[in-house]
Image: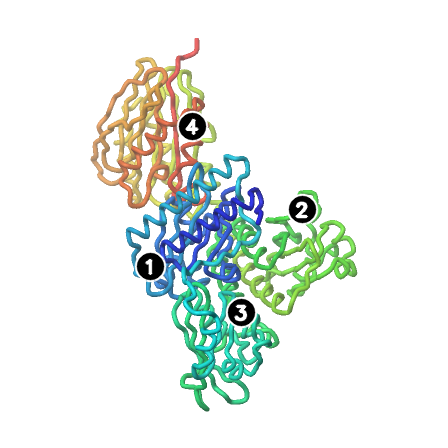
């Protein structure tokens, strides 16, 4: 089987390596996830131990998602979850998609670059902790998978994830001790009836007693799924028992009534190859009430458990999104594939028009044509669905062309689902899923789409409010930071400020560079406690005070003492860290004073980098009469000073000195003469990553050079 970007051999070798990993570790289920080229999405490429349908809710996972696989890749570590209770606590969205007792491990597959992750699941009953042997097997197999992917890339045929995951069987290692006829005779002699299901739920064997109890001939049953060939078993609760047996590998029992009044007990015994089922009469009355049925979407077509878990998984995901782009990404990466759609347009209702907030599968020219249409437009059905609140579905271009003749010609699509986004009776936008081929929408599919539209609407409305407040907050903060740094003869300068990507709050990080005559300057960086408007306002006051004291010619210790007195007098209840440097280019030295801030780094011309041991006084605003020691070091041509806030280095559970040493090591390795690109390289390697920062980051870098003239 040939995969995009790779040969059949590559696919076979990767698949065999996954199966061997499952066998060696004793896991029941295994999956290999590969990163998309933009490294924003993990796609399930190959799975073994379960049918592909079971994996649908977790076949595509955003790298920023709160999921074990994403965490393992993002943090480059093995993630172990020992029980379903632990899964529910740590990863509630994943627990919704996997509501069965199990243990799992996710490990990064990293070679020359990050390739993805290995996911393994053990059946119920596995110990709560991994053994050293299991960890060693997982680490070895991850290295093996990475090596295979590295070799494919080096040979010019990089392996990429296919559109749908491949499903491979897990070898059980059993050998037939008796001929098949002997096994069949044995089963026939047992009381009641017996049958066998493969992992996909299809009947592969049935005894004559089993066929009699089920009320169908063997020919009518073999190759079918019981809940499809036996109407009285067409209840999601019964199919759910089968899913529980496959995923947990535990025996499962339930009772069902075969019309008109015969109660049958089913006992399911699973392993890695399938399920053996014993069927026995249970008398006129059931020994226990059957499992309650899951409410169905439509009486004529009960919703399958897999579809319900998918819906619950997507609903949980929608509760976790924050900004509008998060909503767009979630709909595109998970909801589109769930319904087999190839296109998406997500529009917001603003000032009487539909403003496109995100799209997938459309060229820019089409998006430009559709953007900004009036809400009451007759060009597309979007206006109608917003006015009525009723979704519209078009299975063929001809259906759309009857009332909207131009729409099919502009988009080039062949089928459409227009879903109104309504919140408390108020239209907030429209979500359009489109198809490249005609698509018949079943009643169940329409019902699920309509349900999801309500959830998307709530998430979309919250996200727009978040974005508006976030932009306002950071606009305020940016206004308090210097728009540009002054040019100082003899200094090369670069600075960056990155706001946190999570949370609604404003950070208190600040930096500044202040000229002090022709041959001197003051550099300052700090972090005001808190993440709110008060913190931002105090940050502005601290910057103003730094300018005032510096302009008066105060020494570094006097600058910090003066600001400390100001903050204690204001009694705001907030405090601030601060690092102040007086740079004397004429003497070739810098004098530093520190108020509880991470130490600066000094980079030599040969790139060696180390922290500068600057004794730190108390944070500003804590001790009224605090003193701040001054440290003086040479600053000669080619030397670089690096000032930063804790967001660049802090990692939970890691000592700050260790984190600072790691930053110094990165600067030593960095072979980048341009200061701006050097800072950008440091930011790309920040502990929280590019899209998952929980704290603001400020960086100020100064390099001494020969003065002009």
Please tell me whether mark 4 or mark 1 is closer to you in this view. 1
Labels 2 and 4: the sequence-earlier one: 2
Q: Of residues 558 and 25, which is closer to you in this image? A: 25
Left or right: residue 259 compared with residue 601: right
* Residue 122 location, quadrant: bottom left
Secondary structure of the residue carrying numbered label 4: helix
Q: Which residue is mark 1?
A: 82
- Tag 1: Cα neighbours inside 10 Å, few (<14), some, or many (≥20)? many
How far is disc 4 from disc 1 in space, using C-alphas?
42 Å
Labels 1 and 3: the sequence-earlier one: 1
Residue 504 is at least partly visible in this image: no
Outermost residue toward the bottom? 284
- Tag 3: Cα neighbours inside 10 Å, few (<14), some, or many (≥20)? some
Left or right: residue 5 compared with residue 141: right
Task: Identify whether 564 is placed above or below 229.
Answer: above
Give percent across and percent down for residue 101.
Answer: 38, 65
Residue placed at 38% from the left, 23% from the top? 702
Outermost residue toward the top? 709
Secondary structure of the residue carrying numbered label 2: helix
Left or right: residue 656 compared with residue 341: left
How far is disc 1 from disc 3 in space, using C-alphas?
31 Å
Q: Which mark is on residue 202?
A: 3
Q: Which residue is mark 2?
A: 367
How far is disc 4 from disc 3 in space, using C-alphas?
59 Å
């Amino acid at each position: 089987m040939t995969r995009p970007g790779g040969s059949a051999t590559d696919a076979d070798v990767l698949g065999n390596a996954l199966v061997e990993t499952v066998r060696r570790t004793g896991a029941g289920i295994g999956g290999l996830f590969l990163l998309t080229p933009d490294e924003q999405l993990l796609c399930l490429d190959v799975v073994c131990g379960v049918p592909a349908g079971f994996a649908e809710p977790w076949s595509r996972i955003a790298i920023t998602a709160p999921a074990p696989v994403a965490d393992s890749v993002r943090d480059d570590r093995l993630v172990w979850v020992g029980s379903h209770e632990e899964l529910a606590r740590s990863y509630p969205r994943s627990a919704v998609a996997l509501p069965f007792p199990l243990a799992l491990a996710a490990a990064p597959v990293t070679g020359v670059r990050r390739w993805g992750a290995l996911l393994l699941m053990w059946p119920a009953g596995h110990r709560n902790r991994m053994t050293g042997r299991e960890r060693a097997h997982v680490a070895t197999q991850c290295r093996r998978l990475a090596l295979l992917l590295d070799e494919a890339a080096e040979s010019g045929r990089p392996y990429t994830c296919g559109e749908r995951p491949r499903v491979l069987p897990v070898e059980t290692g059993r050998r037939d001790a008796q001929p098949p006829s002997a096994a069949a005779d044995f089963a026939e002699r047992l009381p009641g009836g017996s049958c066998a299901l493969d992992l996909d739920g299809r009947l592969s064997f049935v005894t004559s007693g089993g066929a009699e109890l089920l009320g169908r001939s063997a020919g009518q049953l073999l190759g079918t799924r019981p809940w499809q060939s036996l109407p009285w078993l067409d209840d999601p609760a019964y199919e759910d028992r089968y899913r529980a047996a496959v995923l947990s590998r535990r025996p499962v029992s339930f009772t069902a009534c075969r019309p008109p009044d015969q109660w049958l007990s089913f006992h399911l015994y699973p392993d890695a190859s399938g399920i053996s089922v014993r069927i026995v009469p249970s008398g006129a009355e059931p020994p226990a009430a059957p499992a309650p049925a899951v409410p169905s979407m439509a009486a004529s077509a009960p919703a399958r458990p897999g579809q319900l878990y998918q819906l619950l998984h997507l609903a949980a995901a929608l509760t976790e999104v924050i900004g509008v782009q998060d909503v767009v990404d979630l709909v595109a990466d998970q909801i589109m594939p769930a319904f087999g759609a190839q296109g998406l347009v997500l529009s917001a209702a603003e000032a009487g028009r539909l403003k496109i907030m995100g799209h997938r599968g459309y060229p820019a020219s089409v998006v430009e044509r559709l953007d900004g249409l009036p809400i009451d437009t007759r060009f597309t059905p979007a206006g109608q669905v917003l006015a009525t609140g009723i979704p519209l579905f078009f299975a063929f271009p001809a259906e759309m062309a009857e009332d909207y003749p131009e729409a099919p010609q502009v988009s080039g699509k062949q089928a459409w689902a227009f879903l109104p986004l309504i919140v408390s009776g108020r239209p907030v936008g429209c979500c359009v899923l489109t198809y490249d081929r005609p698509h018949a929408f079943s009643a169940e599919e329409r019902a699920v789409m309509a349900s999801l539209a309500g959830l998307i609407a709530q998430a979309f409305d919250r996200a727009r409010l978040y974005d508006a407040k976030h932009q306002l907050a950071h606009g305020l903060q940016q206004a308090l930071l210097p728009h540009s740094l002054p040019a100082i003869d003899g200094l090369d300068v670069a600075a960056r400020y990155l706001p946190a990507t999570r949370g609604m709050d404003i950070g208190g990080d600040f930096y500044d560079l202040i000229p002090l005559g022709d041959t001197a300057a003051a550099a300052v960086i700090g972090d005001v406690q808190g993440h709110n408007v008060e913190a931002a306002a105090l940050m502005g006051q601290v910057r103003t005070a730094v300018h005032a004291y510096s302009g008066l010619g105060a020494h570094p210790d006097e600058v910090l003492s003066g600001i400390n007195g100001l903050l204690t007098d204001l009694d705001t209840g907030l405090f601030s860290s601060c690092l102040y440097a007086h740079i004397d280019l004429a003497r070739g030295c810098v004098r530093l004073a520190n108020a509880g801030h991470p130490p600066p780094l000094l980079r030599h011309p040969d790139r060696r980098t180390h922290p500068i041991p600057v004794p730190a006084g108390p944070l500003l605003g804590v001790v009224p009469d605090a003193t701040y020691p001054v440290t003086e070091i040479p600053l000669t041509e080619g030397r670089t000073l690096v000032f930063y806030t804790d967001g660049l280095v802090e990692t939970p559970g890691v000592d700050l000195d260790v984190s600072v040493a790691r930053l110094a090591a990165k600067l030593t390795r960095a072979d980048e003469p341009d200061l701006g690109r050097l800072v950008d390289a440091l930011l790309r390697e920040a502990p929280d990553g590019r899209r998952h920062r929980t704290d603001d980051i400020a960086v100020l870098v100064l390099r001494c050079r020969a003065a002009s003239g």
